[in-house]
Image (spheres, rainbow, N blue to C red):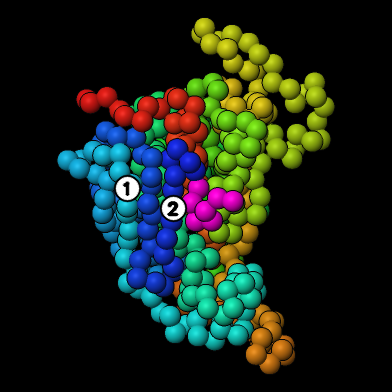
Amino acid sequence: MGLPNTIGSAFAVTCFGESHGRCVGVVVDGCPTGLEISEAEIQKQLDLRKPGQSIVTTQRSEADRVELLSGVFHGKTTGAPVCMLIWNSDTRSSDYDKFVNIPRPGHADYPAFVKYAKMNDFRGGGRFSGRITAGFVMAGALAQKLLLETMSVKVYAYTLELGGIRADISKMTIEEIVSKRYSNEVRCPDGAAAQKMKDLIIEERGKGDSLGGIVECNVPNLPVGVGEPVFSSIESELSKAIFSIPAVKGIEFGSGFAGTRSRGSQNNDVYEMNAGRVVTKTNNSGGILGGLSNGMPVVFRTAFKPASSIAKPQDTLDLSTKKEDRLIVPGRHDPTVVPRAVPVIEAMTSCVLADLAIQGGFIPKVLKSS
């Protein structure tokens, strides 16, 4: 059995902290020696997911200022574990006192209450809060820089669907998608759909409700052969990492579930030559065959449920009296987690690919000095 708070082996990411504890952070063990990295580069990624940036996110105000504590000397990784953290400051823990015995629908309050014999930190969801994904993004900043510097690989995620409104990116190039994905508050490359999504978020927030959606991720230029079948295939490792993000309820690669409604003659990707490269005419496999990258873009989609903390009255139980009760969840919460999940998906995907690339010998453990 692996360590429950660690993912990866060659590039191992261990996260720590709770939503209303003193800090949240991450330790990355196995990052190759010689990678140039700075707090400013890590901060740039953290700023993409920090709260309080717009009306479509929680109004909790956290600076999320990264502190790089170890593993970097003279601007380069040393091969020692890299420890990074951010301090929590804008907490209102009293908002959660009533949830000790009255679990919130859609949250982990009840199973955590039972599993940890009432000793879990319930404030803000504690260990089960989306707040811990800040650590994922810090680790992802290292992985993103590593993939770019050694393999010229970049990971792109964006909002594909929110509240049933789907972006039309069928005629957009990857370059257009990349350039427009962070041009609006919902992180959607289709401007018209983005405005509809924003309007719907504001409408539902006014009703005290929330929305779910789908984030798509695209990784072009990944070389052939990344992945370690059978239990460390790209799909296996990505699925585990992505499902570790709070509120994730589904993942599909390539044609995914839609592919089940086609025939093999339609769904198979036919090989051809293009500019001296072996490529496929379609990419229904999502760039992965047999758990290995096949040279085509790795494409997958992640389903996020509607945010569980809502202002509408909800039925629940009082565990101390075993009687039915009603509650309204106070505090400052995301009306949808989808926009802030975009950089988290990028981060976790980068961590997995960096781990597999090191395992497969695509990235050396000591980088050449520039």
Location of residue 231 with respect to 161 vertically, above or below:
above
Give residue 88's position: percent from left, percent from top: 34, 69
Q: Residue at x 56, y 30 (%)?
A: 227
- 28 over 315 or under it: above or below: above
Q: Name, please, the residue furthest toward the left.
A: 74
Q: Position of residue 67 (x, y in %)?
A: 26, 56
Query: In percent of the image, x 57 and y 41: which residue is there?
Result: 238
Mark sitting on residue 14: 2
Q: Is residue 169 magenta?
A: no
Give the amino acid at mark 2: Thr
> Can you tell which mark lies on residue 69?
none
User: What residue is disc 1 on?
Assistant: 82
Residue drawn at (30%, 43%) of the image: 80
Q: Position of residue 131 (x, y in %)?
A: 45, 63
Question: Relative to residue 120, is residue 28 drawn left or right?
Answer: left
Name the N-terminal-most of marks 1 and 2: 2
Q: Main secondary structure of the magenta part?
A: loop
Q: Measured along the vertical axis of the image, is residue 193 above or below residue 370?
A: below
Q: Is residue 76 left or right of residue 291?
A: left
In the image, residue 3 lies in the stretch drawn in magenta: yes
Count residues near mark 1 (Cα–Cα under 10 Å), then give few for <14, some for 14-19, many for 20+: many
Q: Using a 10 Å C-alpha cutoff, classify the residue at mark 2 as few (fewer than 14 neighbours), some (14 to 19) or many (20 or more).
A: many
Q: Can residue 214 be spotted in the picture?
A: no
Magenta residue span: 1-7
